[in-house]
Image: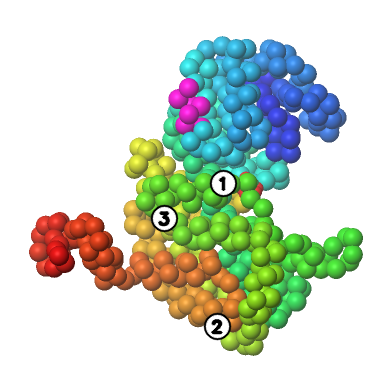
Amino acid sequence: TTSQIGLLGLGTMGAALALNIANKGFRIAVFNRTTQVTRDFAVQAGDLAARITPTEGLQDFVAALSRPRAIILMVPAGQAVDDQIAALTPLLDAGDLIIDAGNADFHDTNRRAAAAGDVRFMGIGVSGGEDGARHGPSIMAGGDRADWDRVAPILTAIAASHDGVPCATWMGPAGAGHFVKAVHNGIEYADMQMIAEVYGILRDGMGLDNAAIAKTFRTWNDGALASYLIEISGHVAAATDTLTGQPLLDIITDAAGQKGTGRWTAIEAQHLGAPVPVIEAAVAARNLSSRRDERAQGQAAFGAAPQAMGDALTATDLERALIAGKIICYAQGFAMIDAAARAFDWPLPLPDIAKVWRAGCIIRSVMLDDMATALARSDANLMLSAPFTDLLRDTHVTLRKVVAQAALHGLPVPALSSALAYFDTMRTHRGTANLLQGQRDFFGRHGFERLDRDGTDFHGPWAD
Ligand code: 6PG
């Protein structure tokens, strides 16, 4: 009997996804460029091997699949995807489908979808790391609706679910799924950064040890901030290094890596004119984190900041600041998706996106359930939707207090302060861009509008 689906690329994520598919009762054929990886995988599959067909050549792989074929690619984003499409296409028939499940740049997915002819192409964002891929990821699909409908029975079966609703949704054509995944990752960067900023205040401002920090995260995980990222932050803070017996967090180098998805989101947001400054701050913070030597020079030149802040803040203050920052960050992310829906003419259903993020993915949280409800009820920006308006009314003062104390004590909180600046900007009717317009008109006669008259091309008295 032939396999119902194929998977190419048995790295960590590919192997986990293949086991998940087999575990859900589907027959799957697998292929990896390095044959030994395929053989090891078949051994590791244990009982599931009965539904797995390991293949050692591309032709055998393609021949093992029932038609029309569906093949999931799980290879590194970029050239490897184009190479595999080029290698597979001559072996496939009209109506066969290639599904890129890696972290592709959605522009690449748009290009590949446009270039697809008789052999169909989809791009799906898969979130949740190895554990998610193995036991239930969140899946953000992009491509032709009819192609999605064909593979949806498998992809919804292997996805995570929340209250029985599968976290696998069609977001729109072409690159729509990978676009939503990129915004997910941008928000992931921002969530992580805001938690790290608060960790800095707990550690350097309040002088808490790792055990106390872990306990604080555990407490928060029972409240409004309950989320995977808060939960794992608690685990990381509590961990002991196996090499030295020291608290693990104390010996991890403070320089963050990134593969680029957060940066893509910040760049795309600028193109769309729908800024996501909290995500931008998080991307910038990762970049600066890697300049350790420069930071050492900075500390030598200016001295260390007077970080200790005594009892100026409580843990509850930090929790409330995080709640406010999180709402503001997600409001930016959803507003960006909304702008993309209009710019690209894609469905990108906001409530369904919040729903697909409720389980399986890295940013899953209790708050996303309320966001799904709020986004379904109203088109308004999340900051202006119940219950988030009230929640922000309750917490923005504390966000301000935390940012102010951090500033006074030289503790960098770029994402939290960016969230605060966004909040203040968006609640200030009379801004200061009147001066920008005056400056532009002065040096370039760009013209300005007036508050007291209709028309668009007024000028100041600086003709000569
Ligand atoms: C996910 C993660 C996953 C991966 C990121 C990490 O949703 O499961 O986002 O896709 O861990 O690519 O990104 P960085 O290496 O850029 O931190």
Return the residue at label 2. 408
- Displayed quadrant of residue 188: bottom right
> Who comes first in sequence, dot 2 or dot 1?
1
Residue 114 sits inside the magenta stretch: yes
Mark 3 Cα-neighbour bin, 10 Å: few <14, some 14–19, many ≥20: many
> Who comes first in sequence, dot 1 or dot 3?
1
Mark 2 Cα-neighbour bin, 10 Å: few <14, some 14–19, many ≥20: few
Ligand 1 lies under 8 Å from the Cβ of mark 1? yes
Instruction: Give the CA separation, mark 1 to mark 3.
Output: 16 Å
Of helix, strand and loop, which one carries label 2? helix
Residue 75 vs residue 237, the one in the foreground: 75
Q: Position of residue 277 (x, y in %)?
A: 46, 60
Residue 63 vs residue 33, the one in the foreground: 33
> Badges 1 and 3: C-beta atoms under 8 Å apart?
no
At x 53% / y 54%, what residue is drawn? 187
The disc label shown at residue 275, or none:
3
At x 46% / y 54%, what residue is drawn? 333
Instruction: State the extent of the magenta-drawn residues as a range.
Output: 109-115
Residue 448 vs residue 228, the one in the foreground: 448
At x 49% / y 44%, what residue is drawn? 180
Return the residue at label 1. 261
- Please indicate whether residue 427 sits to the left or right of residue 334 in the image: left
Of helix, strand and loop, which one carries label 3? loop
Instruction: Give the CA separation, mark 2 to mark 1.
Output: 33 Å
Which quadrant: the C terminus? bottom left
Image: 26 above or below 262:
above
Q: Position of residue 434 (x, y in %)?
A: 25, 67
- Please indicate whether residue 55 sits to the left or right of residue 163 in the image: right
